[in-house]
Amino acid sequence: MEIKKPLSTLKPNQGMLVTLLVFLLMPFVVGLIEGASPAQVWVNESGQSKFLQGLAIEIFILALYALSYDLILGFTGLLSFGHSMFYAVGAYLTGILLKSFGLTLWATLGCVFLAAILQALLFGMVLPRVKGITFALVTLGMASVFHVLVMSAELGKYTGSDVGLQGVLVPDFISPATERLRLYYIALTILVLVFMLYKRFVNSPTGRVCTAIRENEGRAKMLGYNTFYFKLAALILSSLTAALAGVLHTIYQPIVSPNVAGLGFTVAALLIILIGGVGTLSGALIGAVIYRLLDFGLRRYLGEGASFINGAIYVLFVLFLPFGIVGTWRLKSLGIKAGRERLLGLFRKTNQ
Amino acid sequence: MNVFIRRNLLLIIVLAALFGIFAAAAQGMETQDFVITLLRGLSVGSLTFLVASGFSIIFGLLDVLNLAHGTLFMIGAYIGWTVYVRPDTFLDIVIPFILILSGFFLRDVWVSLAMRGLFAGRMKRILPWLGLLIAILILVVILPRYPIATWSVDNYAESPTSISYLAGQGQYILPPPTSFDEISPILAFGGLIMASLVGAFSLSILGGGKQPLQARISWRSFIGFTILLLLAFIIFIFNDPITNALAVLNGNLLFLVALLVAVGSGALLGSLMESTLIRPLYVRPIYQLMLTLGLSAIGIEMVRSLWGRPEFTMPRPELFAGTGEGCPAASLAGWWNYHCSTMILLDGRIRVYNEIFIPTIGLVVLIGVWVLLKRTRLGMVIRAGVQDREMVEALGINVRRVFTQVFALGVGLAALGGVLAAPSIGLSNVMGESFLLNALIALAIGGLTSYPGAALGSLLVGLLQQFIIKYGAIGIPIPYTDLVFKPTPPIVPASTILLMVIVLLILPNGLLGKKE
C-alpha cells in the first residue's frame, strides 16, 4: 500500500494555490507598487488598489456565474438559454427584500436560496418533456417571461422597471464603498469554497452520473439510474450558485439593470465557458478573467470598435483554440511534456 | 382515417384551440380592423418565414444553429439599399470585385500545377504563404486608391440618412462620376488581376492538400476567366452610361435588380462562410454557437462602420409609391392604374407594399422552395440528408457541396427578406435581431426541421404579434367586470414566447415536427 505523502495534495494543485496566493496578496502588492502602505489599503483608501479590487470582485461574480453554467452545460449536458434568470432572481430578490421589505441580510439570503431551489424545480418540471435544443428554447421562454415581468411598469415600484433597481442599502460591514477589502476577501472566499465544492461534486458518484448523462443519457438510464434526479440535482446546485452570484452582484453594484435577466447575459456565460473550455471547472475561472478584462480593456481603449474586435477574438478562439484554453491545454499538455522530455534527453545525451 | 386522428389527436386539439382563440380575437374587433390586422400579421409572418425557412433548412441538414442569420438579413437589406439608391457605388464596387474573383476560376489549373510537382519540398510549403502575402500587399496598396463613388458617414449632408431622405422625396441626384486620379487604371487593373491570380494560386494550394482532386485542366475554367475579365472591362468602359441608365431606369426594375443583387451576394457570403469558417466545426457543435455569435457581432460592426449607426429609410419602388390622383385605390385594378401606395379594402386603408406585396412574395418563396425541395434532385438530397446524413454520404453523394449550396440558399433567403423589409420598416443595425428571435420562436412552434412547420410557425407568430399590438390600442374587456386590459409593448414578444412554451410542453417537437 502506498503511503500518502503530506505534500501529495499540494503538488497537483500548485497552479491553483499560486493563483489563490496572488489574489490574496494582490490588494497589498498593488498598493505598494502605487506607493500606498498596507495600512492605507487596509482602511480602504481610494486608489489603484481599491479600483483593482472592484474589478476583481466583478470577475469573481462572473466566475461564480460561469461555474454554475459550466455545471449544467459542461458536465450534465443541458443546454439552457435561460440561465440568466437564475442570476437575475438572486440579484433582484436581494435588492427588493433589502430595500422594500427591510429584511436583514441573513433572512434575505435564506429567501434567495429558497427561491433558487424553487426555480430550479420549475426548470426541472419541463425536463422530462423536452430535450436538447427544445429545452434550450423552453428555458429561453421562461427567462424571457421573467425579463418582461422585471421590465413591466406594474412592478416598477419594486424592480424599477427598465431603469433598473437602485438605491439598495447594503449592510455597513460589507458596503462596497467603505469596506471593499472585506468584500473582496468575502467574494474570494465564496469563489474558492464554491470551486472546491464543485470539484468535489463532479468527482463524486453523483457527478460521475451527471457526466454519464452528458455522454449518453440512454445508456445511463439503461444502467438503472433515474437520470431525472441527477439532472435536477445539478440544476439545483447550479441555480443556488448563480443566485449567490446575483446576491453578490446586488451588494457590489449600485444598480441592478434588467439586462442581467436578458438573453445577452446567458450568452455571456456561454462565451466565458467556451473561452475557458466547456466541462473544465478551471476554464470557467480563466474565461471569466479574460472575458471581463477584454470587455473592460477594449471598451476603455477602443470605444466604438470594441465589439468588432471582441467578435473577431471569439472567431479566432473557435478556430485556433478549438476546446477553449483549458481544454486545449489538457489535450496538448502531454505532447508538450513529451517534447520537453525529448529536448532534455537530447541535451543529456550530448552532455554524456 | 381513424388511426390518423388517434395518432395526431394532440396536434388537432392544439390547432383547434388556436383557431378558437383566433376566432375569439376576430369577434372582438371591427371587420376593417380585423382585415388590416390579419394582413399585417401575414406581412410580418412572411418576413419571419424568409428568415425561418433558411434557418430551418440549414439546421436540418447541417445541424448548425446559425445565430448570424439575423445579421445576414440586415446585411441583405443594406446591400439592397445601396443598389437601389446608389447604383453608381454599386457599379464602381463590382469591377474590382469581379477582378479579384476572376483568378479563382482557374483553380484547377493551379492545383494541377501543384500536383505536377513543379516545386517540391520546402518550396511547396513556403510558396503559398509568400503568394498570399504578395496578394494582400498588392490589395492593400491598390484598393484604398481605387476610386469608388461613395457616401460619407461623418458628413451629414452626404450621409446615407440624408441621401435616403432626399431619394424618398424624389430629389436625389447622383454625384458626378469618379475618375482615376491617384492611380492609373492600367496599373489598378493589372495589379488587381495579379493579386487575384497569386491569391487564388496560394489559396488553392493551401486548401488543395487535404482533398483529392483530379489533375485535369478543363477549358471551361479558362472560358469563365475570360468572360469575367471581359465583363469587368465592359462595365469599366461603359461605367457612366450604365450608371445613367440604371439611375433613370424605372424604379421598379431597379428594385428588382436590388433584390437579385442582394440575394446573390447573400448566397455568395453564405457559401464563403460555410466553406471557410463553419466547415471545420461540424465535429464541435457548441462552438458553432460561439462562432456565429462572433460573426454576428463582426457583421454589425462592419455595417456600422460602412453605413453609419443611424436608422434610415429605403424609398418604396414606384409601383407602390403613388399618392396623387385616384389614390387610395378602390381595388387592385385601381392600384395597377395609378400605382397607389394605399388602397381601400372593406373600408379599411391598407398599404399595398407592406400588406399585399410582401405576403405575395412570401407565398411565392414558400411555393418555390417547396418545389425545389420536392421536385428537384438537390431537394431530394437535402431531404434525404435531413433524415440520415451518413446514409446519403455512403451512397456516394458529395454532401459537402450540398452543404455549401444549402447554406447559400438559406442566407440568400434571409437577404431577400432583408431587402423586402427595408422599405417597410427601415434600415437599422439591429433590425435582424428581432427577426432572428421571431424566427427561432416560429421554428420551435412549427417544428425545428420541418419546412411546412416553419411556414405555420411564422404565420402564427406574425398574427399573434399583430393582434396583440392591435388589442393594445383597443383593449380587451375582461368579462363580468368593467376593466379593460391593454397589453403593453413588452407583452408582444412575451406572448409569442409564451405560445412557444405552451406548444413545446404539449408537443415537444413542435406542431409539425417529426417524432424522434
Image (cartoon, rainbow, N blue to C red):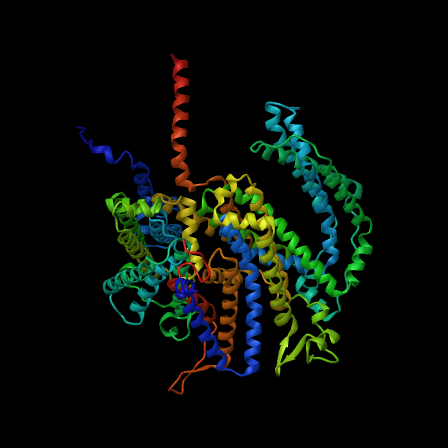
Task: Name the residue: 55% across, 43% down.
Answer: B399
Task: Name the residue: 55% across, 63% down.
Answer: B48
Q: Position of residue A275 (x, y in %)?
A: 43, 45
Q: Please give left or right for residue A90 compared with residue B307 in the image.
A: left
Query: From this viewpoint, which residue is outermost toward the front?
Result: B1
Res. A159 visible in picture: yes
Q: Please give left or right for residue A104 compared with residue B463 in the image.
A: left
Q: Position of residue A263 (x, y in %)?
A: 44, 59
Residue B49 or residue B436, whichever sits in front: B49
Residue B80 or residue A254, whichever sits in front: B80
Q: Position of residue A219 (x, y in %)?
A: 31, 45
In the figure, residue A150 lies in which quadrant? bottom left
User: Is B317 drawn above or below residue B473 in the view shown?
Assistant: above
Residue B403 or residue B261, whichever sits in front: B403
User: Is B82 drawn above or below residue B235 in the view shown?
Assistant: below
User: Is B130 drawn above or below residue A107 in the view shown?
Assistant: above
Q: Please give left or right for residue B362 compared with residue A76 in the image.
A: right
Q: Position of residue A226 (x, y in %)?
A: 26, 51
Quadrant of the rendering where the N terminus of chain B is positioned: bottom left
Q: Please give left or right for residue B458 compared with residue A341 in the image.
A: right
Residue A64 or residue B20, whichever sits in front: B20
Task: Name the residue: 42% across, 41% down.
Answer: A325
User: Is B122 drawn above or below residue B64 in the view shown?
Assistant: above
Res. A177 visible in picture: no
